[in-house]
């Protein structure tokens, strides 16, 4: 298995622009998580899905952030409009809890810089 | 809300010495406690985990202990090597309820000096 695949690896955008981050989870994993990592706040859970259904989005900072999972093999995290304080590394992770596998496999992350 | 506290934030040891990282959690319903290692510029990777029905688990040079009564768990690395240098995150999670949310500690930056 290729693991969790995220794209792009790096994104530099101007304030006010729309940003879309993409994630392909491990095949067969029934949970998908979006985390944001910064030096100040560490690893923050933004939202997670179970079988493509959003379960908890209480970590989404504000209405500028939205996430979708249209099928079991793809999820997006969108920021519109982006702001400099959104600069961070965004990780997607998946887990096969349905198989009794509770650990997370993280993707390589997307380093977002908003200027 | 749920919280995981991790200490120390930075740890420096001599190669060959042991390193211990400690965490406490607030949610008494947590029953799964993973540890992740993140090397500089890389993704966090699961290195060991423990469930609440077990007090200790070992895998080669790393071990984890859990005290459910005190809501403490710890990571022990013996015979440290330079490649152990990384940030280590503890985490606590519920797995037996409708939700499945993992709360991470703030991380411990471990330096192993050769």
Image: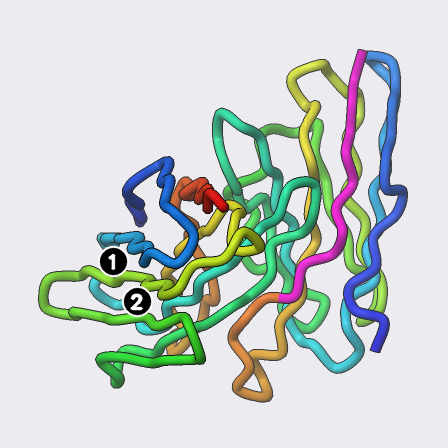
Q: Nearer the viewer, residue A15 or A103?
A: A103
**What residue do we see at 80% from left, 78% from top?**
A27
Subunit that carries the residue with mark 1: B
Which disc, if any, is residue B27? 1
Q: Would you say B76 lies left or right of B66 here?
A: right
Could one spot residue B1 in this view of the protein?
no
Magenta residue check for B6: no
Percent position of residue A68, x then y: 77, 52
Subunit that carries the residue with mark 2: B
**What residue do we see at 85% from left, 71% from top?**
A2
Q: Which residue reaches farthest left? A: B69
Q: Would you say A114 lies left or right of B97 here?
A: right
Seen in the picture, residue A23 relative to A10 is either above or below; the reply is: below
Q: Nearer the viewer, residue A20 or A68?
A: A20
Seen in the picture, residue B68 relative to A48 is either above or below; the reply is: below
Q: Quadrant of the N terminus of chain A?
A: bottom right
Q: Which residues are magenta?
A: A105-115
Main SS of the magenta part reads strand
Splitting the image into 4 quarters, where does residue B71 fall? bottom left
Number of other residues with Cα within 10 Å of mark 1, as a class: few under 14, some 14 to 19, many 20 or more: some
Q: Which residue reaches farthest bottom? A: A99
**What residue do we see at 63% from left, 57% from top?**
A33
CA distance for labels 2 and 1? 6 Å
Magenta residue check for A109: yes
Q: Would you say A56 lies left or right of B66 here?
A: right
Q: Would you say A64 lies left or right of A81 here?
A: left
Percent position of residue B9, x then y: 35, 36
CB under 8 Å between discs 2 and 1: yes
Which disc, if any, is residue B30? 2
Q: Quadrant of the C terminus of chain A?
A: top right
| SS at badge 2 | loop
Seen in the picture, residue A46 relative to B103 is either above or below; the reply is: above
């Amino acid at each position: 298995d290729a693991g969790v695949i995220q794209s792009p690896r790096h994104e530099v955008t101007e304030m006010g622009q729309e940003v879309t981050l993409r994630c392909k989870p491990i095949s067969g994993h029934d949970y998908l998580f979006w985390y944001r990592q910064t030096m100040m706040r560490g690893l923050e859970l933004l939202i997670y899905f179970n079988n493509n259904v959003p379960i908890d989005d209480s970590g989404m900072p504000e209405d500028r952030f939205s996430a979708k999972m249209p099928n079991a093999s793809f999820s997006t995290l969108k920021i519109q409009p982006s702001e400099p304080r959104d600069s961070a590394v965004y990780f997607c992770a998946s887990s096969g809890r349905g198989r009794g596998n509770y650990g997370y496999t993280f993707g390589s992350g997307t380093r977002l810089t908003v200027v | 809300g749920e919280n995981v506290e991790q200490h120390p934030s930075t740890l420096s040891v001599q190669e060959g010495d042991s390193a211990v990282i400690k965490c406490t959690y607030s949610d008494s319903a947590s029953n799964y406690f993973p540890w992740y290692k993140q090397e500089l510029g890389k993704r966090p990777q699961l290195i060991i985990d423990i469930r609440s029905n077990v007090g200790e688990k070992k895998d080669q040079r790393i071990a984890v202990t859990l005290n459910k009564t005190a809501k403490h768990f710890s990571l022990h690395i013996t015979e440290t090597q330079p490649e152990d240098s990384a940030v280590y995150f503890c985490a606590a999670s519920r797995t037996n309820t409708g939700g499945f949310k993992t709360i991470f500690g703030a991380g411990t930056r471990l330096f192993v000096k050769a």
